[in-house]
Each structure stands twice: as structure tokens, then as C-alpha cells.
Image: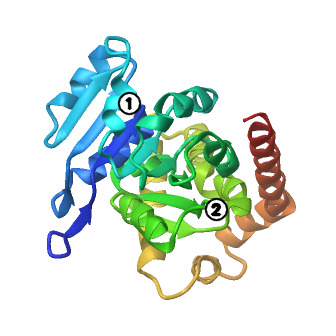
């Protein structure tokens, strides 16, 4: 975020300080972000909680040494980010329900847990926002989907969007699309890493060292992504510009088309969506 366009956020509590919560937390510590009232974070482990204590404006609590840690953290917090494992969510919500501020906004990053589950366990005055960030949040390049709950206002949603904009781009979707979004942007980094793995293996099979292969493949993915971001045309046109008629790339692309790669991605994302719905049904 730019220091020329400061972002103001109210007091925030993170319940659960795993990798995703820490990525969002890192975004909040950038220059130009002001959190009025500070940031509180809880973690089961006292050792992990202590790692956060040295961060500016962050107060951390460990549930293994303080049974009231979660309730203490949410007291006075306008934004409460629930970042524990999905199976832990119901018990956590019951624990904090009467400690939340009446106008609190509870933001879920727990995959598969529906807005209905949150709203059924929280006071009616508390708004709920469901979100699906992805792991590039760690480097400030996330794509996060957010969905409003039935009790959230436009201002509540806008506040959640501002929160996630500290670590990347935000897309607002209705909740019925959040699981589908998870199969694209949520799981998407894994698809990209898998493609990088496979292309790197192909380079090694052609006689390059692992170091040379990694440099070629990772540099190519990085360069292609930056070219696309800087271009005024889409990926199909950029692909055509690389694919000379009767050339080597055309022959390679033909093999990928013969493999029905588009159908493979359809099947892969459909499988992910089916699993997301199974998780939601069990939440």
C-alpha cells in the first residue's frame, strides 16, 4: 500500500495465527496502514504467540497459558478474523459470542464453513463476512474472494475489502460462488506450482542441471506473468504472438491441445468444487 494513500482500519483481532493470518498481519504492518486501537492475535502455542509480541502495534495471547485469551482479544475489536481450522470454528464461536462488541464484524478465513454456521452461533447484531484468500498473500500478491453475510451492511463489506486489499486484489462474490472461487484462486497456486514442477522435470530430462532448469522455468513463468500484467491484450493473443505458424511452439501447443488440457482443468476444478461442497456440508 502507498504511504501517499493511507488506509485506516479499526482495532482487529486475529483468532488463530497460522500462515494465512500472519500473511494478512504482515500486510497490516506495511507503511501507510493505520490500525486504530491496535492488533491482537491469539495462538495455541505460547512460543508462537511470543514471536508476534515484538511486532509494532501487535499484542499476542496464548490459549495454552491463558484460557480467556480469545475473549480478551476480541474485547474492543471491530474486526475479528477467525483463522482457526474449520473443525474448531463452532466451539470457538460459542466461546467468544458474548465477548464480541455488538457492532463487530467477524471475518472468516476458514475454508468450507458457511455464513449460516457463523450467524447461527453469533449474536444477531454481529455481522459476518466469509473470505477465501490464497497463499500469495505472503508476498502481497493475494487474490481474495469475499462474500457478505445476511446481516452485513455495505460498510461492513467495504471494511473487509480494505482489510484484504493490504495483501493483494479482492473480488466480491455472492456466497454461492465462494466455493467455486476457491477452486480457481484458492487452489490456483498449487496448479501453477505443479506446472512449474513438470516443466522443470522436462528441462532436466533434456540435459539441463536442476539449477539451470529452475532458473529457466521460474524466470519464464515470472516473465510471462509480468508481461501479461503489463499488456493491453489477453493471454490468448500473447500466446498467438509467441506461436509462429509452422514453428516449434505451434507443434508443442498442438500436443497440449491433443491432450485436451482444457478438459483436464475443467475436471480438476470440478473435483475441487465437489470436495469444497463436501466440507461445507460437514461444517
In the rendered picture of this protein, how many numbered marks are placed on residues?
2
- Looking at the image, is 74 positioned above or below residue 5? above
Mark 2, residue position: 150
**Measured along the vertical axis of the image, is residue 39 above or below residue 141?**
above
- Residue 67 is drawn in which quadrant? top left
- Image point (17%, 64%), residue name: 32
Q: Residue at left 28%, top 46%? A: 26
User: What is the number of the mark on residue 71?
Assistant: 1
Question: Marks 2 and 1: in contact by CB < 8 Å?
Answer: no
State the mark number for residue 129. none
**Of 162 and 275, the residue lying toward us:** 162
Q: Residue at x 24, y 67 (%)?
A: 7
Q: Which is more N-terminal, label 2 or label 1? A: 1
Q: In which quarter of the image is the C terminus?
A: top right
Quadrant hosting residue 36? bottom left
Classify mark 2: residues with Cα within 10 Å, few (<14), some (14-19) or many (20+): few
- Mark 1: give few (<14), some (14-19) or many (20+) Cα within 10 Å: some
Q: Residue furthest top?
A: 65
Identify the secondary structure beneath mark 2.
loop
User: What residue is shown at x 74% (from left), y 61% (from top)?
Assistant: 176
Residue 281 image position (x, y, % from top left)? 80, 40
Judged from the image, the secondary structure of the residue bearing numbered disc 1 is: helix
Residue 235 appears left or right of 255: left
Q: Can residue 12 be seen in this view?
A: yes
* Residue 223 visible to the viewer: no
Q: Where is residue 137 in the image (x, y as percent from the top left)?
A: 41, 51
Q: How far apart are marks 1 and 2 (CA)?
A: 24 Å
Q: In this view, does 243 lie to the left or right of 51?
A: right
Screen quadrant of the N terminus: bottom left
Q: Position of residue 138 (x, y in %)?
A: 37, 46
Spot the residue most to the bottom: 232
Amino acid at each position: 500500500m502507498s504511504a501517499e494513500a493511507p488506509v485506516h482500519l479499526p482495532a482487529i483481532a486475529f483468532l488463530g495465527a497460522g500462515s494465512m493470518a500472519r500473511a494478512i498481519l504482515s500486510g497490516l504492518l506495511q507503511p501507510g496502514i493505520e490500525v486504530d486501537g491496535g492488533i491482537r492475535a491469539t495462538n495455541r502455542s505460547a512460543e508462537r504467540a511470543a514471536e508476534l509480541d515484538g511486532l509494532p502495534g501487535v499484542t499476542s495471547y496464548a490459549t495454552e497459558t491463558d484460557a480467556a485469551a480469545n475473549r480478551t482479544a476480541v474485547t474492543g475489536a471491530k474486526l475479528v478474523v477467525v483463522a482457526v481450522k474449520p473443525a474448531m470454528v463452532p466451539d470457538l464461536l460459542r466461546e467468544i459470542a458474548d465477548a464480541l462488541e455488538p457492532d463487530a464484524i467477524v471475518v472468516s478465513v476458514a475454508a468450507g464453513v458457511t455464513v449460516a454456521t457463523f450467524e447461527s452461533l453469533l449474536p444477531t447484531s454481529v455481522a459476518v463476512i466469509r473470505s477465501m484468500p490464497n497463499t500469495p498473500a505472503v508476498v502481497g500478491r493475494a487474490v481474495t474472494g469475499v462474500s457478505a453475510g445476511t446481516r452485513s451492511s455495505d460498510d461492513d463489506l467495504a471494511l473487509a475489502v480494505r482489510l484484504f486489499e493490504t495483501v493483494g486484489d479482492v473480488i466480491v462474490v455472492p456466497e454461492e460462488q465462494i466455493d467455486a472461487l476457491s477452486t480457481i484462486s484458492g487452489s490456483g497456486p498449487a496448479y501453477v506450482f505443479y506446472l512449474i514442477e513438470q516443466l522443470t522435470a522436462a528441462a532436466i530430462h533434456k540435459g539441463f542441471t536442476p539449477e539451470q532448469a529452475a532458473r529457466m522455468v521460474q524466470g519464464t513463468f515470472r516473465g510471462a506473468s509480468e508481461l501479461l500484467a503489463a499488456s493491453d491484450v489477453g493471454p490468448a493473443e500473447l500466446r498467438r504472438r509467441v506461436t509462429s505458424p509452422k514453428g516449434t511452439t505451434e507443434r508443442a501447443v498442438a500436443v497440449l491441445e491433443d491432450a485436451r488440457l482444457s478438459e483436464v482443468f475443467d475436471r480438476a476444478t470440478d473435483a475441487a468444487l465437489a470436495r469444497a461442497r463436501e466440507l461445507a456440508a460437514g461444517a
